Image (tube, helix red, strand yellow):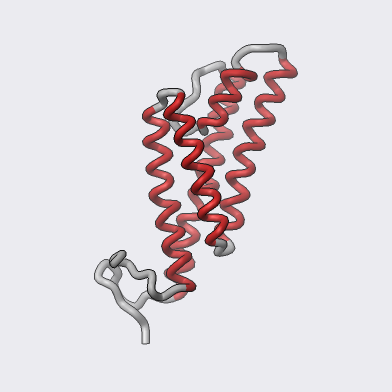
Amino acid sequence: MHATTAGVRGPVTEIYKVREMQLGANWFFWVAILAVINSFLVYYFGIPSLFFGFGTTQYVDSHMVAVGPETQRLTGLALNIGIAAIIASFGYLTRKGGDVAFIVGMFLYIFDAVISLGYRDFFGFGFHMFALFFMFKGLLASRRRYDPSVDYTGA
């Protein structure tokens, strides 16, 4: 017998739970891709960081990419890509259903959001919260796969 909920039509199947979890996990990839795009824009065009970049990459950009010799700028770009790769690796692990990867990745992204606040990037902080909302939905879907007591109502 399949469980049904108020917000979902029909039975909640395992396929639906996996799909919901993967949609939340994909947000790690999206934010990593957007951060790399942001880093290339800062590196090649010298524009200030956009709202979808990481706070940690803003720190690297302000200390390495914006000023300095070419080798220092390239090192900063490599660091920015490495930071994005770390976040993308959490996307890979969470797509496999790792709740711990969801939690650790979200914690690091919250830490990054706080750094964005330190740079007074309020739009960036808002984007972080928007992405975290969908990451959290993916975490809940992952929990629903293994623990039937986690329901859709939150009660």
- Judged left or right of residue 53, residue 76 is right
Q: Residue furthest left?
A: 6
User: Which residue is pictured at 50% across the width and 60% down the height?
Assistant: 22
| Rendered-image quadrant of the C terminus | bottom left
- Tell me residue 84's x, y (percent): 60, 39
Residue 47 drawn at (x, y percent) = 51, 18
Task: Residue 132 in the image: state x and y as whole percent.
Answer: 42, 47
Q: Report x, y in % for residue 65.
A: 63, 19
- Residue furthest toward the top? 68
Residue at (47%, 41%) from the top-left corner? 110
Left or right, 17 with reference to 58: left
Between 105 and 46, which is closer to the camera in this rendering?
Answer: 105
- Vertical side of 22 occupied by 105: above or below: above
Q: In the rendered image of this protein, does residue 128 appear above or below residue 73?
A: below
Q: Residue at x 40, y 34 (%)?
A: 125
User: How many marks can you see?
Assistant: 0
Q: Quadrant of residue 123?
A: top left
Q: Residue furthest right?
A: 71
Could you tell me which residue is drawn at 61 percent across and 20 percent down? 44
Q: Residue 141's quadrant in the figure?
A: bottom left
